[in-house]
Image (tube, rainbow, N blue to C red):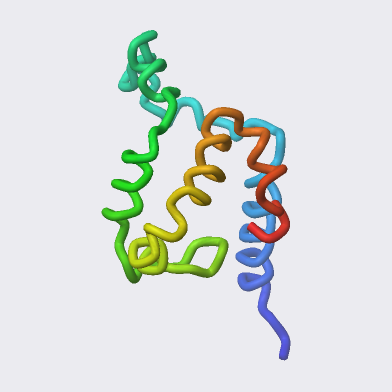
Amino acid sequence: MEVGPMTRIVKQIVVDYFKNLYTDEPCPGANDLLPWDQFQEFNNRDWEWLTRYFHEPEIESVVAHMGALKAPGPDGFQALFYQKNWNLIESSLCEIVTPVFLNISLYYFIFNPIFL
């Protein structure tokens, strides 16, 4: 099947777009499109709140309010599994989740990044 010149041009435009999309080179004009003045910087109080320690009741609340039958996570389990088995898995789950938030580098030690 022979392709016409217009098809080749469109194909080249698409290929070039995706080839340049994930490069280290800055995208010309991208900064002009972003509303830089619309976002306030975090003050110290906000930053402390965002980086605070998570307590077990808060983790339990998050799990309880997740959509039970939404798409499964990287482990293949839907939230329903965690909700129904919370009494069995609470301590283990909190033991895994808490260090991740305290030191993000532990994320790669606890979970297999290839699996995720």
Instruction: State the quadrant of the N terminus.
Output: bottom right
Instruction: Name the foreground residue: 60 vs 17.
Output: 60
> Residue most toward the top?
44
In the image, residue 109 above or below residue 28: below
At which x and y percent is residue 101?
52, 33
At which x and y percent is residue 34?
41, 29
| Residue at 41% over, 32% down | 54
At which x and y percent is residue 63?
35, 53
Is residue 30 toward the left or the right of residue 105 in the image?
A: left
In the image, residue 6 above or below residue 98: below
Instruction: State the quadrant of the C terminus.
Output: bottom right
| Residue at 63% over, 46% down | 21
Is residue 62 toward the left or the right of residue 116 in the image?
A: left
Quarter of the view holding residue 56 = top left
Instruction: Name the foreground residue: 6 vs 20.
Output: 20
| Residue at 31% over, 57% down | 66
Instruction: Name the foreground residue: 25 vs 108.
Output: 108
At which x and y percent is residue 103?
60, 29
Q: How many discs appear?
A: 0
In the image, residue 74 above or below residue 25: below
| Residue at 67% over, 46% down | 110
Is residue 8 toward the left or the right of residue 71 in the image?
A: right
Quarter of the view holding residue 96 = top right
